[in-house]
Image (cartoon, rainbow, N blue to C red):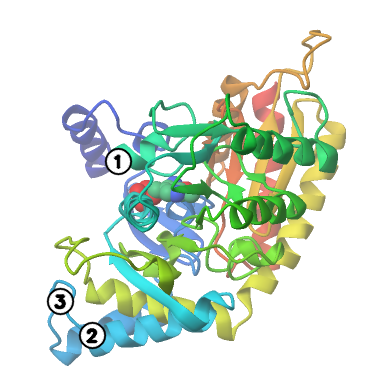
Amino acid sequence: PVAHEGILRRQSLRESAARTYARSLPIVPVRARGLTIEGADGRRYLDCLSGAGTLALGHNHPVVLEAIKKVLASGAPLHVLDLATPVKDAFTTELFATLPRPLADSARIQFCGPAGTDAVEAALKLVRTATGRTGLLAFTGAYHGMTAGALGASGGATDVRVTRLPYPQNYRCPFGIGGERGAELAARWTENLLDDPKGGVPAPAGMILEPVQGEGGVIPAPDAWLRRMREITAARSIPLIADEVQTGVGRTGAFWAVEHSGIVPDVMVLSKAIGGSLPLAVIVYRSDLDTWQPGAHAGTFRGNQLAMAAGAATLAFVRENRLAERAATLGARMLGRLQGLAATHRCIGDVRGRGLMIGVELVDPDSDDPNAAAPPADPSLAAAVQQECLRRGLIVELGGRHAGVVRLLPPLTLTDEQANAVLDRFADALEAAEN
Ligand code: PMP
């Protein structure tokens, strides 16, 4: 406990004011396995933050550890820039085997790195090079990363080259419509803007979207809307970029979230789970977009051999064990139980998600604005629920445009018993935070 307090104190003094998770989660993890993290103070936690959705197989999964140990034992170099290696070959082969057709048949891969935001930058640069245009279409509430281009395409930021379009939302739809009709109106908004010769936008270099907005508060895009976005961009030769950094590798109940709607994007941005807990980020894209000159996109850390080995093992394990399907069924069951909780707790405004990407939006139910599409989000209740969860040994993330969404991103290896334990603790925490 002494070391625990000392570490927390020293880090809070030395680390920047931008510290994020470390602020709300005063834990000093020293051991972890699967769903469980153990702190330096000896306390154990069920981890539903999973490295912000990174840990598809939970912490230190044996197949991931084995893959890493194998590279270390083989004497292979750990750093080789972007040179070809057997490890890279195996990773690329495994990744390509999972890609949606027809993208898989002619895909090119660009190793970026090491973070999701780096791959977003590469994707934006690629479509700008390929089209010779600069403008971008992005969506309200989006999150693509923290470097300049990715940040500019994220909701709330301003970048003169980015046109912000409405992302459909069922709950809290600004027009109070929601559902399929609301989504179709959002699609028409986009269409009108692109086709309006006077007030519209010049032909853009690309459109970037998340199939399920994660940081934006777990907002799954309706399949019909995604198909409309595919149609609209294809008809105007606008490359469509799917940011699957958070939704990929089984998280939403399909290996890639775009598979639910059947759309095939021109570019996919992949990171988080593809590195099996280690930093790795790539873009895969249609070969005819591959207009870069040799060396046009470089970077020192694009060849992390350990991440590729851990990633290949993760991709194979998810595929062989049908963990996407498992995420779909278990996620639906968890959603059902949370919806039951919503029926008896007025402070739960909405429960939504896809697979094991789940959000519970907390609201102040007593607001009486007749024009509001929903009661206002309650970020202080959400923060209180997070702290009550922590006291009960459960780690959850907060998110959402109004910071009122409690997010659950458990590993895909979650057992039924673990899911029940998570939901029991969450229900308890909610009860305590409300009172
Ligand atoms: N895109 C999406 C959809 C994300 O969720 C994130 C991270 N939460 C990023 C991009 C950025 O990834 P990174 O934090 O690794 O830069």
Q: Secondary structure at mark 3?
A: loop
Q: What residue type is disc 1 on?
A: Thr
Q: Residue at x 36, y 81 (%)?
A: 91
Residue at numbered disc 1: 147
- C-alpha separation, residue under disc 2 versus residue under disc 1: 31 Å
Q: Give the vertical position of 62 relative to 37 (above or below).
A: below
Query: Where residue 273 appears, x then y in whole percent?
Result: 44, 64
How many badges with numbers are in the image? 3
Q: Is mark 1 within 8 Å of ligand 1?
A: yes
- C-alpha separation, residue under disc 2 versus residue under disc 3: 8 Å
Image quarter of the C terminus = top right
Q: Are marks 1 and 3 in contact (CB under 8 Å)?
A: no
In terms of sequence position, does the residue under pointer 1 or pointer 3 come before the other?
3
**Corner quadrant of residue 347:** top right
Which residue is more in the foreground, 16 or 28?
16
In terms of sequence position, does the residue under pointer 2 or pointer 1 come before the other?
2
Query: Where residue 242 appears, x then y in whole percent?
Result: 52, 56
Residue at numbered disc 2: 71
**Corner quadrant of residue 21:** top left
Residue at numbered disc 3: 78
Q: What residue type is disc 3 on?
A: Leu
Answer yes or no: is residue 26 visible.
no
- C-alpha separation, residue under disc 1 versus residue under disc 3: 26 Å
Horizontal side of 278 relative to 55 (left or right) equals left
